[in-house]
Amino acid sequence: MKTHAAPHILVTGATGLLGRPVLRTCSANPVWRVTGTSFRRTGPGLVRFDLSQTEQIPAFLDRLAPTVILHTAAERRPDVSEKDPDGTQRLNVGATDALAQWAAARGAFLVYISSDYVFDGTTPPYRPDDLPHPLNAYGQSKLDGEYAIRAAGCDAAILRVPILYGEVETLDESSVTVLAKNMLNARPGAQLPMEHWATRYPTHTDDVAAVLRQIVTRRLTNPEFKGVFHWSGNEPMTKYDMACAFARVLPFDVTRLVADPAPPQGAPRPQNAHLDSAALERLGIGQHTPFASALPSILAPHMRRP
Ligand code: NAP
């Protein structure tokens, strides 16, 4: 990548939970040229493209000629990945591989969003060089995406993040805000069990977008800036803890919430895959939004019609 030229940043998955704030944050820089890709959804300034058609990726990228690719598009629902490992593999690994091959050939900088689910959750906190050991097909696909990038040999940053929440189009878009939807839809007066087994570190999408912007900014002045990084919220919470925080914002009696110590059904999940963000913080990169302070503005548009 030519570090002196204004970058052309391509955000894949720009209609997604994370992609939207990433597109917004990058577009706020008047010098950066920013293009977003979408798949089923669309919107102004977005280019529609099916990344699972991996053989078409090189020609697509040749047309756009980005110098930086922020690759957020993925299948990120563990239970869907478990049922459709081939489709997940095509998107999470095949597309990542094609993007990485193109970036290696054209000298573009690739930033790949990976997940805390590459770890098994038995020995937290996890540093970037700790040994991954995914427990489910989704985690394995994200790790295989990382391996594809390393094998392609492109200049890249891999940013692993944990469970995300932020501004949502519908409350069930994030596995954090869906808790609020379940609370709003619960039978009046009924008790509501909430998982109290896995310790999660809910992380605001605006914070991840800010970290990505800082990574790109760093890279533009320092061609050696690359590697594997972690960014995580700093508040350990089970889903029961998150629901208690929602109860303070919603009209919901917190005593109706019942802490359920059983592990969740479906694809196996890590119990505590806490990502250690210290390395990025030491570099002066990061942003933390306190969980409770973010909830009122996230919930406000959904209070009438969840
Ligand atoms: P998301 O809300 O499900 O968004 C997925 C994005 O990928 C959407 O923009 C979607 O486009 C696009 N997409 C899906 N299939 C596609 C295809 N075949 N071709 C092109 N684009 C396609 O996901 P997210 O929560 O923003 O996740 C962003 C990244 O963070 C992912 O890499 C995920 O693995 C990682 N991550 C997420 C979480 C989390 O809690 N959400 C946790 C850890 C890591 P359309 O909507 O237009 O179809």
Image (spheres, helix red, strand yellow):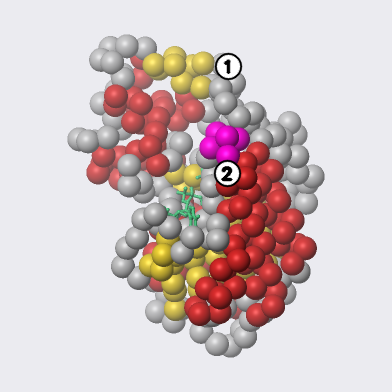
Under tag 1, what secondary structure? loop
Disc 1: which residue: 262
Sequence-first disc among 2 and 1: 2
Q: Nearer the viewer, residue 58 or 79?
A: 58
Q: Nearer the viewer, residue 115 or 245?
A: 115
Q: Nearer the viewer, residue 203 or 97?
A: 97
User: Residue 127 location in percent, x, y?
Assistant: 73, 48
Outermost bottom residue: 4
User: Residue 59 location in percent, x, y?
Assistant: 56, 75
Q: Amino acid at mark 2?
A: Pro
Residue 151 against residue 171 in the figure, above or below: below
Residue depicted at x 46% and y 36%: 175
Disc 2: which residue: 162
Q: Which quadrant holds residue 62?
A: bottom right
Queried on whether the Cβ of the residue with tag 1 lies below 8 angstroms from ligand 1, the answer reads: no
Q: Which region of the structure is painted magenta?
A: 79-84
